[in-house]
Amino acid sequence: MGILHETFSPLPVIPVPGGECYKSRLEYILNSEALILFSTDRYGRIDFLEGEGLAQTGFQSEDLVGISIQELDWTATVRSGNGGLRIFSPTQILKSVLLGEEVEAEAKFSGRIFRSRFSPLRYEDGEIQGMIGLSLDITEAKKSELAFAQSSRDFRTAIEGLPIVVFSFNPVAVVTFAEGGGLKRLGLLTEDLVGKNIFERSEGDPESMEAIRASLKGEESRYTLRIKGRSFETRLYPRFDEKGRITQVLGVSNEITIREAFEKRIAESESNYRNLFEHNSQIMFLFEYNSFAILKANGVAKSAYGYDGEEFLEKSLLDLMPPEHSLQLGDRIRGTGSGPNFIPEVRHLKKNGEAFYMDITATRFEFNGKDCVLVAGAEVTQRVRTEKEKRFNLAILSQISDAVIALDSERRIIYYNKPAEEMYEIEWGENPIGKHYSELFQRDWMSEENQKAVMEEYERYGQASAEVIHILRSGKRVRIDCNLKKTKDENGNDIGSVMVIRDITDKVRARESLEKAINDLETTNQELEQFAYVASHDLQEPLRTIASYLRLLERRCSSHLPEEGKEFIQITVDAVKRQQNLIESLLKYSRFGAKIEVWEKIQIENLLKGVVDDLFTGLNAADVDFRLESEMPIIQGGPEQIRQLFLNLITNAVKFRSKERRPVISVSARESGEEWEFKVADNGIGMDPKYFDKIFIIFQKLHSLGEYPGTGIGLSVCKRIVENHAGRIWVVSDTGRGSEFFFTIPKRRSE
């Protein structure tokens, strides 16, 4: 800032009023404030430089004294008379001062900003000898000023971009300031508000006027006002001086039109979601993530679990699950992510302890400031049971020895078990699922009539059985017994069929062999029966001759025979008669062993009347009380054989009557399933149960001829007749208590 004279002094030679005292004060100011005091000669050389402000420039006084200010790097900004700003160089500053002007400027030097006054330095005679300058370091203040200005600009920019109005009014309610983007939205300018009474802008709204009055009393207040179709929420903040008096009220109006609409939509949405939650057909409840406490539940959930509203909300998620699984399932549900998480077939417990299953979707989210999980579920108990039954049935099917093949409606294979795999030669790695059954085998019916009958039965009843031949891919022919059954869905629609198949190749061979043996046996029996009939007939001829000649001998020689001879003749005649009776019984047994050729309807009641009439003499002689104790049915059978059956049983009852009481013989009948069950009962001598099986064997007798004559063939004939009719015969008796003979005859003829 210039070079002084050769000799330097601490202070320039300046007239100093007050002498040394003033000088010391000046030195104190220079050393305590961020000031720089300097002076130059007419050439701008610095001849004096002092002040605390010099320290911030990085220079010391001796660094600059003697240097011209025109050589230093600094500029000055000068405000002109019209308010404009001009940049002055050091030379221009010096020239202006040497012309007698005082220059005030902001000077920038060494990175610092100074507020400076440059004045002429005069001799005592008034001649200008140089320049004196006083500079105050305002760098920090300038930065603060710039920052404040920037903040002000940022604030103004911000509020002008926001849908708000920032304003203030004084204690007499006159608006003193108004800015913000909200003005533009209302079509207003700042000047439309500033200077106006705030009550005039409230448009007579009671809420806003009350809030303004409250703010002027020193209370913070708020109000909502709708202007030109827009809603503004205004908050008022009173400001006070140090004595507590209101200096102004600051107001901030925020447009809430969109927020109101949004809040309305939220309220509607919350209502919709509440309705969706409460009236949803699914089970829905909400529990707190950390504690498992149930916070909300809809009506379906309460009903499903069997709790009322308040009772349900006192429960934990763990209370709804089996104790042995609750923690594991709870952690599984709680461990899901934020998105919907599907968990199938979760076992839950009702209030009464009954278990049921649900498919659930768990969604984690925040509700009323809490970390929660929403559970939505549908009961699938029936499906789970059905699946378990299905798995159980499949397990059973896999264990049975018969082959099982399930087909869909297109006759494609949807299931087969191990025996089917073996029967139809399905190789390892081969998968016939989805293939038509004809790729495994071809069917060959026994006959067209057989095929037609089976298919008619299948279509009519939904199931059928048939013996058919399956021709395998290898050409092997397998005789099978096939049970075919339709499968239906829950609506009763046909969805396919199931075949249960058994290889009966060996069985058929055995059956054919058995049929041949039976035919051979029947032929042999017929031949034997014919032989027995012929033989019996031929045997009777010599017996009749012997008996005739013995009687002739007895008549002609009776007077010449001793008593012993007559006795021998009688013994021989009796033996011949017994032999004839035996042969007659054998013929009868042989005759009833023959197949019934003609089956007829038989009215049992009429048949019994005929039997009683035939036995009238014997029954009357024995004083028998004969009773029919029920209605008699009409059956199908051989009339002659059925007549002989009742005749033998009634005759047997008469023969073995008790001598101690009047004989009572009763006949009754009852239905027993697909059979008629008959009973012939008496009150005779009865028999020991150990003989029950023996009495139906031919020629077996329980008594001697002297006690009860007979051949022992009557009950065996009864047994053969009943068996000819595909029935059964048995006895219930005890010694001295009479006997009850039962036999059955099927209602329908057995082919």
Image: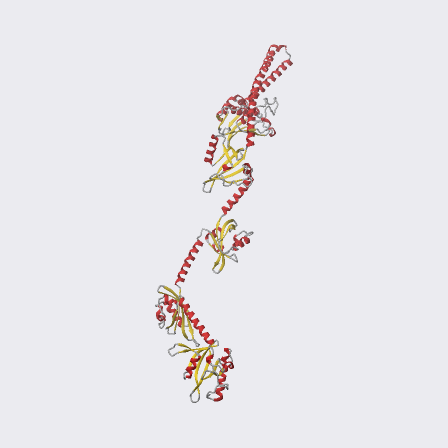
- Residue 662 visible to an observer of this rendering: no
Whether residue 22 appears in this view of the structure is yes
Q: In this view, does 532 lie to the left or right of 271?
A: right
**Which residue does the image show at 54% across and 43% down from the upper left?**
392
Q: Which of 705 and 508 is in front in this view?
A: 508
Task: Classify 161 as above or below 3.
Answer: above
Percent position of residue 99, x then y = 41, 84
Q: Is 8 rendered above or below residue 749?
A: below
Q: Which of 69 and 730 is in front in this view?
A: 69
Coloration of the structure image: secondary structure
Count the numbered circles shown. 0
Quick one: 484 or 642, which is closer to the camera?
A: 484
Q: Position of residue 272 (x, y in %)?
A: 42, 56
Rendered image quadrant of residue 577? top right
Q: In this view, does 568 lie above or below 274?
A: above
Q: Position of residue 335 (x, y in %)?
A: 53, 55
Q: Point out residue 430 in the picture as x, y percentages from the top left corner.
A: 54, 40
Residue 194 left/right relative to 673 = left
Closer to us: 466 or 651: 466
